[in-house]
Image (cartoon, rainbow, N blue to C red):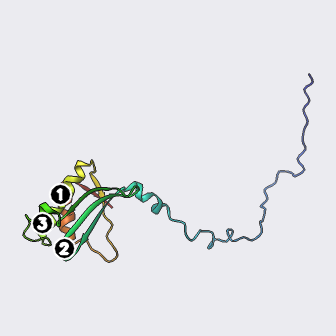
Amino acid sequence: PLNLRIKHSNPMPKQNFVVRAAWTRRSRGEVARKPNRKSWKQRTDMYMRPFLLNIFFSKRFFNAKVMHRATSKVISVATTNAKDLRHTLPSLTDDNACRVMGKLIAERSKEADVYVLAYEPRKDERIEGKLGIVVDTIKENGIIFVD
């Protein structure tokens, strides 16, 4: 067999040149971002901080639950409106009820092997008052809060 090597001559000499493409929407800097695209933090946050504490306060009772963000499964629930608490607590909306609910959430989360929670306050919401009592009680019972 003959070894034939064919050399292809490159018609363009090696030079540094830039090809200027026609104007497109993507070639402009301010329009390059897709308007509906979520940021990296928005896309990865549910996996970096998977367990979210959700607390609801009404005039008659309090409700707290720990949810897994990615699957939306409820890990633990505590409410002052439950049968066992409704008849034992003197008031369903005072500070003592907040402490009991925080302790229950912490215990039930530990039973489900959840030791780290995240809490995202709503717009114009501060972690103080009854909400602060619930969060502090959960922290005192061994649950770590991640920002």
Q: In the picture, residue 64 is in which quadrant? A: bottom left
Please identify the quarter of the rendering in which residue 60 is found. bottom left
Q: Quote the CA–CA distance across marks 3 and 1.
A: 14 Å
Left or right: where 16 falls relative to 38: right
Percent coordinates x, y for residue 62 in the rendering: 20, 69
Type of the residue with mark 1: Leu
Which of discs 1 and 2 lies nearer the camera? The answer is: 1
Q: Secondary structure at mark 1?
A: helix
* Residue 142 visible, this angle: no
Q: Secondary structure at mark 2?
A: helix
Q: Residue furthest top?
A: 1
> Percent position (x, y) of residue 122?
33, 73
Whole-angstrom CA distance, mark 1 to mark 2, is 19 Å
Q: Nearer the viewer, residue 18 or 51?
A: 51
Residue 86 is tagged as 3
List the single residue furthest toward the front.
Answer: 83
Marks 2 and 3, how far apart at CA: 22 Å
Label 1 CA crowd tier, 10 Å (few <14, some 14–19, many 20+) = many
Instruction: Tell me the amino acid under the disc marked 3.
Output: Arg
- Which residue lies at the image location 57% right of the left edge and 71% below the top edge? 35
Q: Quadrant of the C terminus?
A: bottom left
| Quadrant position of residue 73 | bottom left
Q: Nearer the viewer, residue 23 or 97?
A: 97
Q: Position of residue 23 (x, y in %)?
A: 74, 71
Visible residue check, residue 31: yes
What residue does disc 2 label?
Answer: 129
Q: Nearer the viewer, mark 3 or mark 1?
A: 3
Which tag, 1 or 2, sits closer to the chain's start?
Answer: 1
Q: Counting other residues with Cα less than 10 Å from the Cα at mark 3, is it few (<14), some (14-19), or many (20 or more)?
A: some
Q: Which residue is mark 1?
A: 104
Q: Are marks 1 and 2 in contact (CB under 8 Å)?
A: no
